[in-house]
Amino acid sequence: SFEKNVKKGISSFTGCSQFFEDYFIKKGTSVSYTIKYSDIDRFIETDTNIYLSCKNMGIIIILQRKNCSDDLVLFLEKKLKNVNEKYQVSVNMQYSDYYKYIFK
């Protein structure tokens, strides 16, 4: 299933993202997710990516920093400052290890 593959770090979801005051929409070719910021339970920033976990939906959203404006990054940091577990992880960590942090 898609959720199991994401947990293993072998599934990807490409598409566009739209950010609003209380939620954001991640759109792909065949699926679209609307996620409230209040539903995000993990927020991980690295030099290359931003990882947003919504455990109750079983999804991880990966945003490439090179595609994010500075204003968007600041907006997300402000919106998600109250997330209980905000991790700063090593940039040397393997890609699949991020999923271990997100789904522990």
Image (cartoon, rainbow, N blue to C red):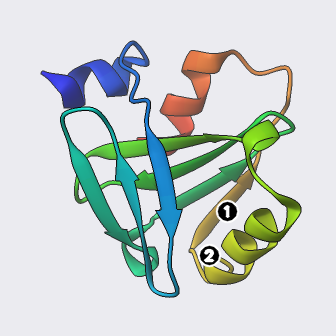
> Percent position (x, y) of residue 75?
72, 76
Depth check: 26 or 5 in front?
26
Left or right of residue 2: residue 44: right
Residue at 32% x, 54% y: name it: 55
| C-alpha distance separating marks 1 and 2 | 9 Å
Q: Is residue 98 visible?
A: yes
Q: Is residue 104 visible?
A: no
What's under tag 2, amino acid-wise? Leu
Other-residue count near label 1 (Cα within 10 Å), few / some / many at <14 / 14–19 / ≥20: some
User: Which residue in the structure is indicated by mark 1?
Assistant: 86
Q: State the SS at label 2.
A: loop
Residue at 45% x, 64% y: name it: 41
> Percent position (x, y) of residue 14?
44, 30
Q: Is residue 88 above or below residue 10?
A: below
Q: Please identify, in this view, whether the residue under mark 1 or under mark 2 is nearer the observer.
A: 2
> Percent position (x, y) of residue 66?
81, 38
User: Which residue in the structure is indicated by mark 2?
Assistant: 80
What's under tag 1, amino acid-wise? Lys
Quadrant assignment, res 63: top right
Q: Which mark is residue 19?
A: none
Q: Is disc 1 in contact with disc 2, using a CB cutoff of under 8 Å?
A: yes
Left or right of residue 18: residue 86: right
> Percent position (x, y) of residue 6?
34, 26
Depth check: 36 or 68 in front?
68
Residue at 84% x, 33% y: name it: 90
